[in-house]
Amino acid sequence: MAEKPRIKLPKEAAKGEIIQIKTLVSHVMESGQRKDAQGKPIPRKIINGFTCELNGKPVFACTLEPAISANPYIQFNARIEEAGTFKFAWTDDDGSVITAEEKIALKA
Amino acid sequence: MTAINRRQAFALGGGFVALTMMPMAAHAQVSNDAAQSIAKFTGGKEPTKGRIALDLPEIAENGNTVPLVLNVESPMTADSYVKEVMIVADGNPNSGVATLMFTPLSGKAEASIRIRLAATQNVIAIARMSDGSLFTERKTVKVTIGGCGG
Amino acid sequence: MQYRYVGLVAAALAAVALGGVCASAQEAERKGIPAPRGHVFKTIISGYEFRTKETRALQDDDLENPGFLAVERAADVWKKAEGNEGKSCMSCHGEAEKSMNGVGAAMPKWDDKLNKPVNLEQRINICRTEKMKAEPWAFRSQPLTDMTAFVRYQSRGMPVSVKTDGPILQWFERGKQIYYTRYGQLDLACESCHERNNGKFMRADFLSQGQTNGFPTYRLRDQRLVPLHERFEGCMFDVRAEPFKPLSDEFLALELYVAWRGIGLPVETPAVRN
């Protein structure tokens, strides 16, 4: 079940300003190292990648391994040269993608 | 204040000692694929120590959720920026943790994530700059297992 | 000497030695609230104060706090009609921000009809079965823990204010009796750790006062929200006792009594703990 990711960033920024972006998404991040009560290995299921772009230009991305805690938290920055739309995408091992968008305006 | 008696001290402290000792024992003998991962990333080139600030707790409250803040010194302009930073842990079942990819639009080569550490071990970051140069930093994090939270 | 015994002696010595040093180093920083007259503690201290600065930081920022994933899930469920009556929580209670304000800080609370106290989980399920004609949620299930956290969150910052007089008094006394009873192979009571030895470094961790103001709480160990009775079970398991059942009369009485031990502490749900 894809839930709404939690994202925090300012609504507007001055041209050239560097803003901080915080993201948190609900995911079990099953490492593939654990066994169930019957001793059977629990298959790996993690968010293995994340990307953030602003108006189609890459801002930040990462690949993630099972050593990332459940409910992955990713914090990074962005330099704002223009108003526009941030697109965020979290890719699951099963191929599904959690997406979100946030707008940013330029301070007058 | 009443001192804990001998029996209680044993009961509270001793019960899970086997568990608390395990990670240290494991640390001494196990080495995962960290060296190979680093070699693959660097192409065998020796990274220079420095320019990276790796902020991790000296002692993790819980190995399941260890906050990590990475900061690489760089002007982050189109001419000179941090391209990617590989983070590995040398005492987990697999060394991989994350690879962070920056662009000049990142503004700062700074990121924060939360990681799992199975035992006391080194966390190593290697940064590749836009000119191809490599920098590295490492931190040892003590992970204790055995508390009531463990 | 057998390996096992070497370990026991080492651990016992380490526990005592570290207990002295680390506790005093951190104690000065631990802030609490003055306890009312006749209380067991002079100062009532939240579990927050016993955690590292990194763990506290996770709780301090609502975006970084993973417990809010549960709160947000339940905020959606609050509005969703379920069961044969076609009702949602909202159908009767309106906006939770108003109607639930203060409710979670005063639980468990006496219920005249049932002639016993009920806690938040039980109250939510009573609503589901009686008013919504929906299936009750299982204890420890994600929807029940989410909703418990969501309702309790509406009291965040408000003082824990359970009533202990009147007909509920005998439940309070029962809870107190359980608190001071030694259980399990390790022969320990709640009191052994959380009253007599809180602040000491034990088993690579600081013993807290065992306060409940942050529950359901996001535990780093479990990487999810943990309801209070699951934590009680964990404590009893740790002392190698046969735990009481979640939502049993025993744990309900204990929940009431332990809530009183934290009277006046601000509700921190969803807190972040080890």
Image (cartoon, grey):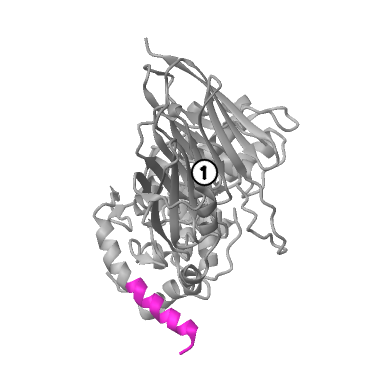
- What residue is rendered at 55% in x and 51% in y? B40
Q: Residue C112 is drawn in which quadrant?
A: top right
Does residue A93 appear anywhere in the picture?
Answer: yes
- Residue C48: say if magenta: no
Q: Residue B110 is drawn in which quadrant?
A: top left
Depicted C2 relative to depicted C20: above or below: below
Q: Is residue B82 left or right of residue C45?
A: right
Q: Position of residue C155 (x, y in %)?
A: 44, 36
Q: Chain of mark 1?
A: B
- What residue is rendered at 36% in x and 52% in y? C52
Q: Position of residue A84 (x, y in %)?
A: 50, 16
Closer-to-camera residue (A100/B50)? B50
- Residue C2: say if magenta: yes
Closer-to-camera residue (B85/C271)? B85
Depicted C269 relative to depicted B13: above or below: above
Q: Position of residue C6 (x, y in %)?
A: 43, 83
Closer-to-camera residue (A89/B2)? A89
Q: Residue furthest bottom?
A: C1
Residue named by callout 1: B99
| Tag 1: amino acid | Thr
Number of other residues with Cα within 10 Å of mark 1, as a class: few under 14, some 14 to 19, many 20 or more: many
Could you tell me which secondary element the residue under label 1 belongs to? strand
| Residues shaded magenta | C1-16
Q: Residue furthest right?
A: C84
- What residue is rendered at 39% in x and 55% in y? B139
Q: Residue furthest top?
A: A108
Depicted C37 relative to depicted A62: above or below: below
- What residue is rendered at 41% in x and 36% in y? B109
